[in-house]
Image (cartoon, coloured by chain):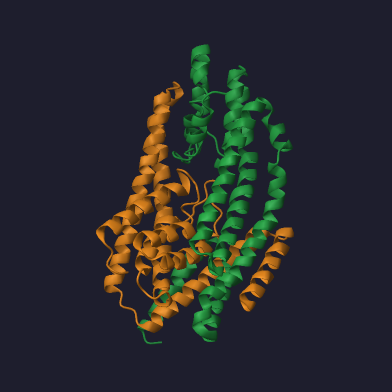
Chain colours: A green, B orange
């Protein structure tokens, strides 16, 4: 596989042209360019077709996009019919999206954020932030290297390779870890902020939290946490202004 | 917000742009998380503690959001930079509420601006459909680089708006002590509500919920006996 490292670096910007039409498509085409370079000399016609396919609609979690990138590049070199490659891309969207979102956005990110929050309020300060960045980026970059290599090695059999890999098992395990880490952080952060305000201040803040939780359930997505917070602040300033 | 030196404002503007780019475009290295964005912004402006206080609280709001697929979400990176700029130099009990309020407003504007950039990207692609259909690598590169530039411009604008808001609030919003403390308590309460709501929603009814509860018990014990 030539151009692998350049493709890997370009994958870091795979969402650079994110849009509602092709989603990650153009970013995937940009990342595929170094991988498809050798095809230009071997089969220029096929190379042109491959470039067109590489930038068509695609969507998945960006951290696992390397699997699709490697697999489709390998398929292009193996002269798999274009329609079959297009079907592979379409078929990979949902599983790579679901696995990647569960693994990273609902798993690793909240787990590390929760741990970092707990460490900060326990006195680790900016060291906790540095550790968060180091651990996350090691995992994320390692996953990207693995993904692109696994995809290129498996080609059209990438689905089986994903199924047999560590990813589905990690998804099952990371959820509870993330729950525990966020759960650990919540009371610690609350105590960190509210300790200096006395019992009245603490009860007041917890009452706001209880009201927020209740009205969010009542109004659903129409009342996001940001809207609730801004509304509560505006109401407070208004009541203070009128002298309440 | 104390009077920041011009070079500190410039550094915050650059940092705000970097974290805005990090959210979606490049490199998605968690720089845009409020905890990171706030700590670095505080360090750049000479008050790490203010950055940590603002960053931790906005991180609670950020944990409520799953940035999945085409979902709309607030942009907390530049928002945290603006909130930190406002919090600098003030006792945190008085400055945190209004700083986080500004941050939440900027986050909402940032989220809206993200939709604008996405629509602009789609228009740019439509204009180059023929080149893409012809397999021109140059067209892909051009679209990619202009997409990144568009997002960087968005980051500059959102951060500049936030810093301008911080400057305006520090100059004209004279809050009495009780209102300032009240805003801080409301912000903390709303942040706790956001993170708890998000955590319960993500947990569903499976093993994750039990682990969430176990973590909360452990955190409570640690907080009480610390």
Is residue A157 left or right of B123 when viewed as pictured?
A: right
Residue at position x 29%, y 54% in the image: B10
Q: Is residue B131 above or below residue A104?
A: above
Identify which residue, A235 or B15, lies in the foreground. Answer: B15
**In the image, farthest residue toward the left:** B6
Residue B25 on image: x %, y %: 45, 43
Q: Is residue A32 above or below residue B187?
A: above
Q: How many marks?
A: 0
Residue A197 on image: x %, y %: 49, 82
Q: Is residue A93 above or below residue B153?
A: above
Tell me the quadrant of the picture where the C terminus of chain B can be found: bottom right
Visible residue check, residue A223 = no
Residue B123 on image: x %, y %: 39, 37
Residue at position x 30%, y 69% in the image: B2
Is residue B133 left or right of A135 when viewed as pictured?
A: left
Q: Quadrant of residue A191?
A: bottom right
Q: Is residue B33 above or below residue B83?
A: above
Tell me the quadrant of the picture where the N terminus of chain B can be found: bottom left
Identify which residue, A93 or A216, lies in the foreground. Answer: A93
Identify which residue, A170 or B180, lies in the foreground. Answer: A170
Is residue B30 left or right of A218 when viewed as pictured?
A: left
Residue A18 on image: x %, y %: 46, 40
Residue at position x 43%, y 74% in the image: A233
Visible residue check, residue A31 = yes
């Amino acid at each position: 596989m030539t151009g692998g490292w350049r493709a890997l670096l370009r994958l870091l910007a795979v969402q650079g042209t994110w849009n509602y039409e092709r989603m990650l498509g153009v970013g995937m085409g940009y990342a595929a360019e170094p991988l498809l370079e050798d095809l230009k000399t071997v089969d220029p016609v096929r190379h042109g077709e491959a470039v067109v396919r590489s930038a068509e609609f695609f969507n998945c979690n960006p951290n696992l996009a390397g699997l699709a990138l490697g697999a489709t590049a390998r398929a292009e070199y193996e002269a798999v019919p274009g329609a079959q490659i297009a079907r592979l891309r379409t078929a990979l969207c949902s599983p790579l999206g679901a696995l990647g979102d569960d693994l990273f956005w609902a798993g690793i990110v909240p787990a590390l954020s929760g741990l970092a929050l707990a460490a900060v309020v326990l006195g680790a300060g900016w060291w906790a932030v540095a550790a968060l960045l180091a651990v996350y980026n090691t995992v994320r970059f390692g996953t990207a290297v693995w993904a692109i290599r696994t995809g290129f090695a498996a080609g059209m059999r990438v689905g089986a390779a994903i199924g047999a890999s560590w990813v589905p098992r990690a998804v099952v395990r990371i959820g509870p870890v993330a729950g525990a880490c966020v759960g650990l952080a919540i009371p610690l952060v609350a105590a960190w902020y509210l300790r200096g305000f006395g019992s009245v201040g603490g009860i007041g803040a917890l009452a706001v939290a209880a009201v927020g939780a209740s009205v969010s359930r009542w109004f659903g997505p129409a009342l996001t946490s940001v809207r609730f917070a801004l509304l509560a602040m505006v109401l407070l300033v208004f009541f203070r202004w009128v002298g309440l | 917000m104390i009077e920041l030196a011009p070079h500190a404002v410039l550094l915050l503007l650059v940092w705000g742009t970097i974290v805005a780019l990090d959210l979606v475009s490049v490199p998605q290295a968690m720089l845009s998380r409020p905890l990171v964005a706030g700590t670095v912004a505080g360090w750049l402006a000479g008050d790490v503690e203010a950055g940590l206080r603002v960053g931790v609280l906005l991180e609670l709001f950020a944990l409520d959001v799953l940035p999945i697929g085409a979902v709309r979400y607030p942009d907390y990176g530049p928002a945290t930079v603006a909130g930190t700029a406002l919090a600098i130099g003030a006792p945190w009990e008085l400055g945190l509420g209004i700083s986080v309020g500004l941050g939440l407003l900027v986050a909402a504007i940032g989220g809206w601006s993200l939709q604008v950039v996405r629509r602009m990207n789609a228009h740019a692609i439509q204009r180059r459909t023929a080149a893409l259909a012809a397999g021109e690598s140059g067209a892909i590169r051009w679209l990619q680089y202009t997409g990144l530039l568009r997002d960087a411009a968005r980051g500059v604008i959102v951060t500049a708006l936030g810093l301008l808001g911080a400057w305006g609030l520090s100059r004209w919003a004279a809050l009495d002590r009780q209102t300032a403390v009240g805003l801080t308590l409301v912000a903390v309460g709303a942040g706790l509500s956001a993170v708890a709501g998000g955590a319960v929603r993500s947990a569903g009814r499976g093993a994750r919920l039990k682990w969430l509860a176990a973590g909360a018990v452990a955190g409570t014990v640690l907080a009480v006996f610390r």
